[in-house]
Image (cartoon, rainbow, N blue to C red):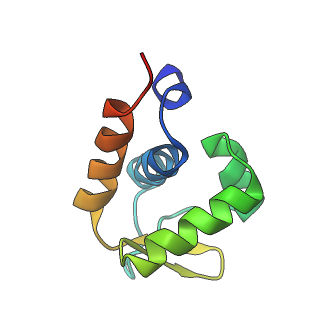
Amino acid sequence: MNILAHMQVKGRIAYCLLSLERKFGASKDGHINIILSRQDLASYAGTTYETLFRTLNELIEEKIISVDSKRISIINENQLMDLTKESERQKPL
């Protein structure tokens, strides 16, 4: 959690998605093996529903993830990992 506290929102959401995929795995069709509401995911990432919704839409537009109802697939894991690293580098001193 200490890592998340210093990250920007997009990095926190990316980190949480990667974490969920590592913990629960992915189904045959590539979806993370856990179904969470947007509100639950926002709470897990430590952000608001509105910010999560906006950020997920950005990630979808950038073709980093795809979303089908409450099921999320990671399309480009490397870009998600880059977002977590970028966010860490930009933390305030």
Residue located 72% across and 45% down the image: 43
Q: Residue furthest front?
A: 93
Q: Residue furthest left?
A: 78
The image quadrant where one finds the N terminus is top right
Q: Residue furthest top?
A: 93
Residue located 33% across and 56% down the image: 80
**Relative to 35, residue 82 above or below:** above
Mark count? 0
**Relative to 62, residue 7 above or below:** above
In percent of width and height, residue 93 lies at: 42, 15
In percent of width and height, residue 28 lies at: 37, 78
| Residue 35 in sight here | no
Residue located 44% across and 52% down the image: 14
In percent of width and height, residue 52 lies at: 64, 59
Residue located 50% across and 40% down the image: 8
Left or right relative to 18: residue 4 = right
Left or right relative to 65: residue 71 = right
In percent of width and height, residue 55 lies at: 56, 63
Left or right relative to 10: residue 39 = right
Q: Give the camera-side residue of 7 and 37.
A: 7
| Residue 5 in sight here | yes
Q: Give the camera-side residue of 36 and 57.
A: 57
